[in-house]
Amino acid sequence: MIRKILIANRGEIALRIICACKEMGIPTVAVYSTADQNSLHVRFADEAICIGPPQSAESYLNIPAVISAAEITNADAIHPGYGFLAESAYFAEVCEACGITFIGPSPESIRLMGDKERARATMKEAGLPIVPGTGRIEGPVSDLLPLAEGIGYPLIVKAANGGGGKGMRIVNSGPELAGALKIAQSEALAAFGSPDVYMEKYLPIARHIEFQILADHHGNVVHLGERECSIQRRYQKLIEEAPSTYITPDVRSKVGALAVKAAQTVNYANAGTMEFIFDENGNYYFMEMNTRIQVEHPVTEMITGIDLVKEQIRVAQREKLGYDQQKIDLRGHAIECRINAECPETFLPFPGKITAFHPPSGFGVRVETAAYSEYEITPNYDSLVAKLICFGRDRAEAISRTNRALEMTVLEGVKSTIPLHRKVLAEEDFVKGRLTTRFLERWSRR
Ligand code: MV4
């Protein structure tokens, strides 16, 4: 049994993990940078340890500092949240070597799925459809051109060790290939430490739909349905919802079963997400797997009633899932709006001091936030201010509830995505559930 959990994160997700621990009776340790001294995760954890200066590399990503904090406080487990060290196979190994339970999958699972090209090959082996494309590519462009012609245009170059959109380049014709490869390789090197890339057929009209799975150490795996995450800008998700208007019960069981089988083949144990892309003809392909709790996990919690963070902790202490697939019911509809401090024109982060903040509440409204009036959004970290999650008996109710909750949010001192959310929710295409990964392009160039 886990006796004390150190939370290697900050912001709303650190608070979310503290909530789960408090309800389970598990004491918590917060770690914080000097910029976060007055943060709510520091206030609500049972203990708190400063681990370094504001720059993430020297605090939240500083493995020796995080491990020392765990040792000093006698924490026997670490929850990494999302971002920071959540997908560091090395960090998971260090935890293991220090006798600390990493609340996440094995280092092997993290390493395998972190390599998006190997993940593709592995999932293909497990019977999942993957987008037509190549393995890692190298050599002169003259050798690669025939490969590209074989896939056809448009195609997309992706970083092998990437994910989440960084290092991606769309290629519309042969003459663009050389330049796109160069840029993708150098972006990949800068962001992920490896210039390796691969090519895939690009699906221009598509939906990003991901399946949530939950797996224990005893071979039990269930899926908790899907989340539609097509509304993104700069490869950052803006709105997520569950269920997807595009997924019929038949497709859900079929793709859900594939996701479960895939998790079983790699002996996965933890919460995890299989990301798929669906084209306009109903074809679907595995894209990547995320081996962490995700930002958008609450929409799944709202429609399943399952607390995913508690489940992660239970799985980490080797408990069995207490239910099988048949026991999982999806009920109602949930929509999450990410409220970021950002410039509405450029979609770029807009740090600053929040002068007034009154989050909405009421029936069916959930707000995940670590912000308060006078709280400062610093450029050191993510610009997420709050997640607004609204539940409804059906999608129409979830939408009207989201509208009223956005209207009843007071957020002053920083520019935010609230006006953009209101604009999206007023669009006929959104209301009708006609979503694609290009939805937001109507208001911006790229
Ligand atoms: C794609 C794609 C279309 N075709 N791959 C974006 C995040 C990363 N996980 C994968 N992503 C995509 N990969 C192929 N072969 C479309 C996306 C994509 C996207 C692309 C442009 C603008 C918005 C997007 C939103 C979601 C997914």
Image (tube, rainbow, N blue to C red):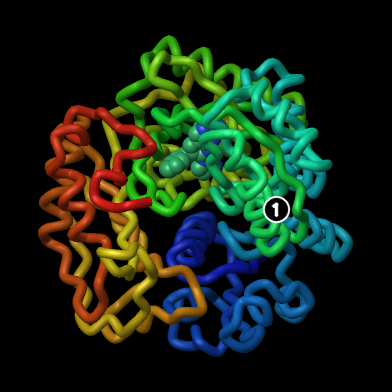
Q: Which image quadrant is residue 226 in?
A: top left
Q: Position of residue 73 (x, y in %)?
A: 71, 78
Q: Is residue 78 visible?
A: yes
Pick the front one: 66 or 238: 238
Numbered disc 1: secondary structure = helix
Query: Is residue 61 shown above or below 322?
Result: below
**Residue pictured at 26% horizontal, 64% vertical:** 345
**Label 1, on which residue?**
185
Classify 10 Å Cα crowding around label 1: few (below 14), some (14-19), many (20 and above): many
Q: Residue furthest right?
A: 97
Pick the front one: 197 or 120: 197
**Residue pictured at 39% horizontal, 65% vertical:** 384
Q: Amino acid at mark 1?
A: Gln
Q: Is residue 296 left or right of residue 404?
A: right
Pick the front one: 145 or 231: 145
Query: Is residue 151 shown above or below 344?
Result: above
**Residue pictured at 38% horizontal, 79% vertical:** 377
**Residue pictured at 34% horizontal, 22% vertical:** 246
Q: Is residue 284 left or right of residue 360?
A: right
Q: Position of residue 268 (x, y in %)?
A: 72, 35
Q: Position of residue 220 (x, y in %)?
A: 67, 26
Q: Is residue 246 left or right of residue 101?
A: left
Q: Position of residue 120 (x, y in %)?
A: 70, 30
Q: Is residue 217 visible?
A: no
